Amino acid sequence: MRLGVDLGGTKIEVAVYDDAGREVVRRRAPTPRAGYDVALEEFARLIAEAEKEAGARCSVGIGMPGTIVPRSGRVVNAYNTPFNGRRLKQDLEKKLERELRFANDANCFALSEAIDGAARGAEVVFGAILGTGVGGGIVVHGRVLNGLHGISGEWGHTPLPWMSAEEHPGPVCNCGRRGCIEQFVSGPALAREKSAHGEANALAIYADRLARALSLVINFLDPDVIVVGGGVSRETRIYASVPELLPRYVYSQTVETPLVPAAHGDASGVRGAAMLWPA
Ligand SMILES: [Zn+2]
């Protein structure tokens, strides 16, 4: 059996899947707020309890914000978890007495959708999360591309292309830089636009920004499909309006890249984490 964990800033989701991919256990708990040692203990216990409920020793995959730097083994960019800056993989492996696989949550999302979701069968998949933040993951031939620094697919922290005079230089981002894509196409960015310009206008402005942001992905990676997750994925109009705008920005005579909503919704993260281990 495969156990997947989606570690978020507010909650931890744990699910166990049998050989047929059926979910047999699901648990949810608030993300521990205590210091590292206590949080680690609680985290390990949550996994052990789910495993006990499943009644079998499981492979364990964990999806989380940020990444684990391959060279140092330390968690980075997971600011709202108690594990940032720590050697979480090493410490949790000791507690659970087995090898664990970790991946960025956007990578887990992309993997889940590539294996048996909205991008099933596609060779190169880009998963774009448009939520509180903007994340991205790349899956090639059914495998997550991690990268030397574990940041493959992090398109959210590059500048929005072709900024207008009004957009330039853009808001300050959580990463400390200015004008990041995240500041223009996240859920909160869309909400801000709606309160300033009304629903229809805001969606038009948003679609153009998203088209510019995704043109960067298409020029660089040219994925077979782009799957959208996160809160904004429920804005159904973007799946028609954004592809219409892409030819203005993509370096190609024709642009046929499908833009599709995630098939597994919020469950994609926990499913993809379990899939870090092959069936
Ligand atoms: Zn940024």
Image: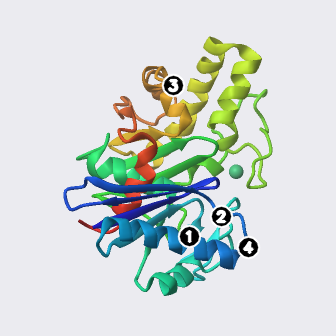
Pointers 4 and 1 in contact (C-beta within 8 Å): no
- Secondary structure under tag 3 reads loop
Q: Is residue 186 left or right of residue 44?
A: right
Q: Residue at x 62, y 35 (%)?
A: 185
Instruction: Give the percent coordinates (x, y) of residue 111.
Output: 37, 55
Image quadrant holding the C terminus, namely bottom left
Residue at 59 percent across and 77 percent down: it is 41
Q: Could you tell me how far apart the alpha carbons at marks 4 and 2 are, in whole angstroms? A: 8 Å
Which badge, 3 or 2, comes first in the chain's sequence?
Answer: 2
Q: Position of residue 129 (x, y in %)?
A: 52, 44
In the depicted view, which residue is nearer to us: 262 or 52? 52
Determine which residue is flagged by label 1.
43
Question: Marks 2 and 3: in contact by CB < 8 Å?
Answer: no
Q: Are marks 1 and 2 in contact (CB under 8 Å)?
A: yes
In primary-sequence order, the first of circles 4 and 1 is 4
Query: Is residue 144 visible in this depiction of the protein?
Result: no
Tell me which amino acid carries mark 1: Phe
Quadrant, the N terminus: bottom left
**Residue at mark 3:** 235
Q: Nearer the viewer, mark 3 or mark 2?
A: 2
Q: Nearer the viewer, residue 237 or 95?
A: 95
Under circle 1, the secondary element is helix
N-term mark: 4 or 3? 4
Q: Which residue is mark 2?
A: 32
- Label 4 sits on what residue type? Gly
Amino acid type, callout 3: Glu
